[in-house]
Amino acid sequence: MRIEHATGQQAGLVQLMVEPKAAVVLTGALRERGWAIRQ
């Protein structure tokens, strides 16, 4: 996992490395919670 953010900003960047089989489920769960996903 890698997290980048700037003080005072409302957004940041989180990079996760997951098993390919888990990626679809994780992507859906994060989107349901309002996360923007870029692949």
Image (spheres, grey):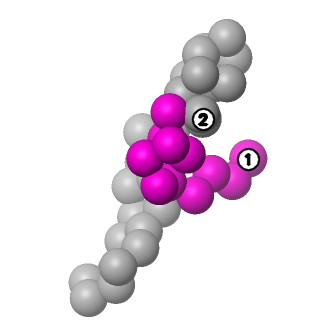
- Image x and y of residue 9, in percent: 34, 84
Query: On the picture, is 21 further left or further right than 30?
Result: right
Give the residue type at disc 2: Thr
Query: On the picture, is 14 further left or further right than 28?
Result: left
Residue visible at 42% across and 39% down?
1
Give the residue type at disc 1: Gln
Instruction: Compute the Cα span from label 2 to label 1.
Output: 10 Å
State whether residue 24 is above or below residue 12. Answer: above
Question: Is any atom of residue 17 visible in this view?
Answer: no
Residue visible at 59% across and 16% down?
22
Q: Residue 2 or 37: which is nearer the viewer?
A: 37
Look at the image and give the residue range highlighted in magenta. Answer: 29-39
Classify mark 1: helix, strand or loop.
loop
Disc nearer the start of the sequence (2/1):
2
Classify mark 2: helix, strand or loop.
helix
Residue 33 on the magenta segment: yes
- Image x and y of residue 37, in percent: 62, 51
Residue visible at 26% across and 84% down?
7
- Tag 1: Cα neighbours inside 10 Å, few (<14), some, or many (≥20)? few
Q: What residue is pinned by disc 1?
A: 39
Q: Residue furthest left?
A: 7
Overall secondary structure of the magenta section = loop
Q: Residue 13 or 25: which is nearer the viewer?
A: 25
Q: Residue 8 or 27: which is nearer the viewer?
A: 27
In which quadrant of the rendered view does residue 19 lie?
A: top right
Q: What residue is pinned by disc 2?
A: 27
State whether residue 11 is above or below residue 15. Answer: below
